[in-house]
Image (spheres, rainbow, N blue to C red):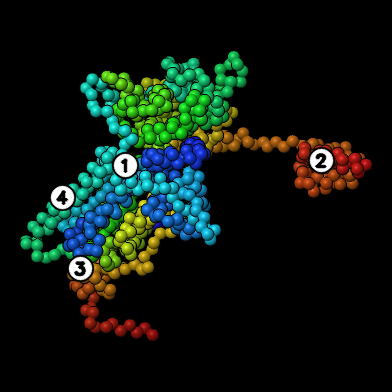
């Protein structure tokens, strides 16, 4: 889904925008090297593998021979990305031919990984009978609950039972692009970006929030580089294992509490020290850095009579579906709704496009219908697109109407004048009327005055 | 031939089933010792797992009388300390080779007939069965491909079985890549890679095996459309006859089931149809002009 690419690439752009010295320091950790490697486009990954054990630089021209002519644009994208992230460094030799060499630290870390294998960033705590660790299933429900609670609070603070412990200034920072309050005494409404945010996949939403969190980190006294490296490291921990908080630095300890609110980790109090356990949201972080789609199970069935059945109990899903459909019944495990013209017009007013609605339905199709081709019936998708096109029937151009011409010659002269500038929109020769684009009005007046 | 264009496949994720040739008769005489060979293959497997968190690798060993599963990265306990995994693989390989040679000795009496070729058809079938199980496991699965690391020469007695596996792979749209670490080309694998759209490579220098593997076999199927990959100069399409398993250039073909024979037979041994025609010695004058 393109949105993941946009948001995740923004995160990697943020990483790439770090100053060179900080970026090189980041590559000290082999986990960051792995995460960066996994975030590259597929061609770039292959180039890294090929260059991994080469010590001398390789000429750019010879690299171009690795691809077929159709692949040259992808090749360029891959090389640019590698240079941006300083994985490849450009070396100019005497002949002024550009050649590329791999970043030393990156190379040695990756070589070590391949020959001796990956390790975990820190060792899990030994099993202690005094503390009961939640199972993987419990962790998942905890993560989903926390994340939904956070999202609900984000879009509408009044609807939530318990609020997260984020300070109101933090929430405002998150809501910056997504909500705006038109008037002070009115509840803030979702903006167009806000609606698109809700329809994105969980991983994309997560990356968006994390990006905002890191951007505002400086004001709160945390070094963004440390945060970035901690977050990328987090995805390499094992799901379901508990780690001691004592192994974290100050900055990371502050961050852990916030991450627990988002549902990325679960914070527990052990016998002597605090423990944290990463959830599935955290371990999936590095997967979503590239374009891979998430493997969540869908829950929506759309029928050819425009009725929609969503097998979900989450309030968040209900809110999202309410954006573009009319919810009719809500049963203990099922939400029944219908996609109607009014509900869609409502969605279009709010800035959601038909493409987003259709891709949301396709991405979240229930497994029973997901195997069918197409997963959403074509008459429904076509109708959604047609209703959107309905709103674009009329195109407006500001223009001026000229009438009451004294003579036909003057009328013809004006027409030619307007046509020369490409601004003639309509003319009626019998009644001698003329419509010209607004931008030409001043010149038209001067022309007429000159003719008189 | 392009891989299956289906929404069910995730773009970048691949499942690689690697078939390792463990024929002891070949490795005893090979220029590259088996341990060195593993030193190239295991980092290559690590690199496949590194490229994408969801990639899966399965190792199948091709012995002389049997084949077996050695390693499956989707097992769940494969992540974490990779040294343990590596030594696990080596131990399993040793156990397998021991068992395989026992089976070989048992069936041949005292093992006087040296089995020169390895059981390629068996491991191809194991790989295809595994992939079929993955296909049936859910809607979203990785794009599968098979990588054969073969050193032993082709055994003509396996011709029919290998061709059947190749056609099944073609129907399932699974490319078969081949990397020849032995001295001679393998006609079976040339045909396999040609028919299924895979890559066939015989590296000139075996010291740099990892580099060849990383350059040609590491990319996922989608990106292969944009890469210039090695193509064999010519494909050896010779068949083996069904009666004696000898490689032949010209022979007799049954018109019903297309089985190939080197000598004239009265009855086809595969489909049982009888050939009611004159013997090949007399010529039929075809003089219409």
User: Quick one: B49 or A125, which is closer to the camera?
Assistant: A125
User: Quick one: B121 or B104, which is closer to the camera?
Assistant: B104
**Helix, strand or loop at mark 4:** helix
Query: Are the residues under marks 2 and 4 on the same chain?
Result: no
Q: Where does label 2 land, which residue?
A: A434
Query: Are the residues under marks 4 and 3 on the same chain?
Result: yes
User: Quick one: B122 or A205, which is closer to the camera?
Assistant: A205
B102 on left or right of B256:
left
Tally of marks: 4
How far separated are the C-alphas under marks 1 and 4? 26 Å
How far separated are the C-alphas under marks 3 and 1? 48 Å
Q: Where does label 1 land, which residue?
A: A118
Q: Residue at x 52, y 25 (%)?
A: A219
Q: Chain of mark 3?
A: B
How far separated are the C-alphas under marks 4 and 3? 32 Å
Q: Which mark is residue B245?
A: 3
Q: Where does label 4 land, which residue?
A: B95
A61 on left or right of A142:
right
**Helix, strand or loop at mark 3:** loop
How far separated are the C-alphas under marks 2 and 3? 90 Å
In percent of width and height, residue A258 lies at 42, 24
């Amino acid at each position: 889904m393109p949105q993941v690419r946009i948001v995740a690439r923004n995160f990697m752009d943020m990483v790439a925008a770090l100053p060179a010295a900080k970026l090189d320091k980041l590559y000290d950790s082999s986990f960051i090297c792995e995460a960066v490697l996994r975030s590259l486009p597929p061609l770039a990954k292959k180039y890294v593998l090929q260059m991994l054990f080469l010590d001398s630089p390789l000429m750019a021209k010879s690299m171009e021979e690795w691809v077929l002519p159709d692949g040259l644009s992808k090749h360029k994208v891959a090389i640019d990305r590698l240079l941006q992230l300083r994985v490849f460094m450009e070396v100019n030799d005497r002949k002024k031919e550009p050649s590329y060499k791999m970043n030393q630290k990156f190379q040695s870390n990756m070589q070590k990984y391949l020959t001796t294998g990956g390790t975990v960033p820190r060792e899990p705590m030994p099993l202690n009978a005094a503390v009961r660790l939640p199972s993987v299933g419990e962790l998942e429900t905890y993560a989903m609950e926390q994340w939904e609670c956070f999202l609900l609070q984000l879009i509408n603070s009044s609807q939530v039972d318990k609020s997260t412990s984020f300070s109101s200034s933090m929430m405002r920072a998150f809501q910056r692009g997504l909500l705006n309050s038109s008037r002070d005494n009115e509840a803030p409404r979702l903006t167009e970006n806000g609606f698109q945010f809700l329809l994105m996949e969980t991983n994309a939403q997560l990356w968006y929030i994390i990006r905002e969190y890191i951007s505002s980190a400086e004001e709160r006294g945390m070094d963004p580089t440390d945060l970035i490296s901690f977050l990328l490291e987090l995805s390499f921990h094992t799901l379901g294992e508990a780690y001691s908080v004592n192994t974290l630095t100050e900055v990371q300890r502050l961050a852990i509490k916030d991450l627990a609110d988002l549902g990325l980790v679960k914070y527990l109090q052990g016998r002597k020290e605090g423990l944290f356990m990463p959830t599935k949201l955290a371990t999936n972080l590095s997967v979503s850095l590239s374009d891979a789609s998430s493997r969540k199970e869908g829950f929506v069935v759309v029928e050819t009579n425009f009725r929609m059945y969503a097998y979900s109990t989450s309030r968040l899903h209900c809110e999202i579906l309410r954006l573009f459909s009319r919810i009719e019944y809500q049963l203990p495990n099922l939400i029944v709704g219908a996609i109607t013209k009014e509900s869609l017009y409502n969605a279009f007013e709010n800035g959601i496009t038909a493409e987003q609605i259709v891709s949301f339905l396709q991405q979240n199709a229930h497994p029973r219908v997901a195997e069918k081709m197409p997963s959403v019936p074509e008459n429904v998708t076509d109708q959604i697109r047609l209703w959107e096109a309905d709103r674009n029937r009329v195109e407006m151009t500001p223009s001026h109407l000229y009438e009451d011409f004294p003579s036909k010659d003057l009328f013809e002269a004006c027409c030619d004048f307007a046509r020369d500038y490409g601004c003639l929109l309509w003319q009626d020769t019998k009644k001698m009327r003329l419509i010209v684009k607004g931008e030409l009005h001043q010149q038209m007046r001067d022309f007429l005055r000159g003719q008189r | 031939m392009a891989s299956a264009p289906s929404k069910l496949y995730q773009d970048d994720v691949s499942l690689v089933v690697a078939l390792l040739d463990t024929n002891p008769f070949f490795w005893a005489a090979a220029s590259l010792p088996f341990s060195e060979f593993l030193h190239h293959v295991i980092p290559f497997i690590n690199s496949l797992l590194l490229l994408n968190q969801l990639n899966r690798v399965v190792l199948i060993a091709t012995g002389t009388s049997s084949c077996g599963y050695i390693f499956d990265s989707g097992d769940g306990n494969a992540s974490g300390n990779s040294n343990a995994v590596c030594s696990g693989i080596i131990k399993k390989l040793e156990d397998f080779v021991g068992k395989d040679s026992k089976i070989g000795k048992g069936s041949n009496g005292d093992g006087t007939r040296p089995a020169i070729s390895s059981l390629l058809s068996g491991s191809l079938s194991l790989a295809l069965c595994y992939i079929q199980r993955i296909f049936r496991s859910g809607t979203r699965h990785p794009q599968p491909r098979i990588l054969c690391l073969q050193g032993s020469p082709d055994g003509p007695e396996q011709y029919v079985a290998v061709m059947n596996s190749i056609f099944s792979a073609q129907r399932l749209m699974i490319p078969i890549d081949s990397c020849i670490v032995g001295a001679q080309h393998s006609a079976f694998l040339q045909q396999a890679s040609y028919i299924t759209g895979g890559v066939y490579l015989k590296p000139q220098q075996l010291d740099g095996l990892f580099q060849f593997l990383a350059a040609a076999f590491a990319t996922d199927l989608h990106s292969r459309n944009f890469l210039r990959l090695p193509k064999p100069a010519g494909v050896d399409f010779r068949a083996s006859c069904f009666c004696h398993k000898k490689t032949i250039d010209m022979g007799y073909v049954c018109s019903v089931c297309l089985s190939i024979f080197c000598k004239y037979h009265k009855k086809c041994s595969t489909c049982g149809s009888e050939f009611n025609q004159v013997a090949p010695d007399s010529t039929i004058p075809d003089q219409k002009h």
